[in-house]
Amino acid sequence: MGRLAAVAGVAVALALAAGCADAGSQASAPSPSASAAEKDLHRWLHEGANKVGQDTYSSRFTMTRRDVEGASVSTRVEMTVDPARRRSDMSIHFPIRQPGHFQWVEIKTVDEESWARFFGFGAPPEGWIPVDLPRLFGADSSIFTGTQAMDDLQDLVKTSVELRLVTERAVHGVLDLRRHPHLTVELCEESSGTNAMVPFDATLDAQGRLTNLSLHFDQVEAGAGEWQFLYHSFGRRLPIDPPPAKDVLEPDDLDPQLLAELRDVGW
């Protein structure tokens, strides 16, 4: 269950994964030495990220890596978000290699109230559990309505350097994560400058919205894997409503072992 908090906050902390070399560096515009063409691409990419959260949208974040046995495993986070109404549906799928086994969590947020239900953690419940996301995650809880996720996406894109156009709507470059504004001194001290330079590919649609962002950590360190963000279904009016009252569980309705595990991690 401890993996839930780590994965749910991954978009908030995504730029911290590779570390940095200088906590005092800034993540603003490209350096003055950047060419005019690169500055234009940087602006184009940033505007594309900014357009993602201007309407309803759906997203899929996939984090693929090598496990201790060398096998490829993936964690997947899918969201449908209505930023204006601060509503979202989220599912977090954990990597399970055993055939017939599965673990995932669904989280629904409507009007600052949230509910979760769990599958594959022992005996799965049949309904939803009310959860206090601000108490669990503090300011990071805004990721569940998409607002923090969009801020993080824009901060990440601002660190892009060495940009070049691959096709009319695709760009390749490097994310210099030392330029990210939310790195901590501790993380900076733990890593060198070399592993903070992460190659990436990005694609925009005909309306100038970012639709794909792929970070190639495995090109920096063997086995580190890849992170991919996909954005789609812009403006699609999908219903995001509270769960029916009859499907909301009380603590007495839960499996005692599952309830104990949830309480251990603060749910």
Image (cartoon, rainbow, N blue to C red):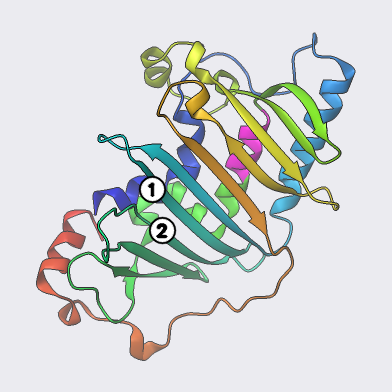
Q: Is residue 53 left or right of residue 69?
A: right
Local packing at callout 1 (Cα closer than 10 Å; few below 14, some 14-19, many 20+) is some
Q: The disc labelled 2 sits on which kind of residue?
A: Ile
Q: Is residue 11 above or below residue 146?
A: above
Residue in the image at 45% along x and 34% along y:
225
Contact check, label 2 and label 1, Cβ < 8 Å: yes
Of the 4 image quadrants, the one containing the N terminus is bottom left
Count of numbered tags:
2
Say whether disc 2 or disc 1 marks the residue closer to the N-terminus: 1
On the image, which quarter does residue 257 sit in? bottom left
Q: Is residue 21 above or below residue 107?
A: above
Extreme-right residue of the structure: 36
Work out whether residue 168 or residue 44 is closer to the camera in this orientation and state it. Answer: 168
Question: Is 163 placed left or right of 37 in the picture?
Answer: left
Mostly what secondary structure, the magenta segment? helix
Look at 48% across and 27% down and name the residue there: 218
Secondary structure of the residue carrying tag 1 is helix
- Mark 2–mark 1 Cα distance, whole angstroms, equals 8 Å
Query: In which quadrant of the rendered view does residue 45 lie?
Result: top right
Residue at 42%, 29% in the rendered image: 224
Relative to 4, residue 45 above or below: above
**Residue extent of the magenta highlight:** 151-158
The image quarter containing residue 240 is bottom right
> Image check: 5 left or right of 188?
left
The residue sitting at 88% across, 22% down in the picture is 37
In the rendering, which numbered label is found on residue 7?
1
Q: Is 155 included in the stretch rendered in magenta?
A: yes
Q: Secondary structure at mark 2?
A: strand
> Which residue type does callout 1 highlight?
Val
Q: Is residue 141 magenta?
A: no
Tag shown at residue 92? 2
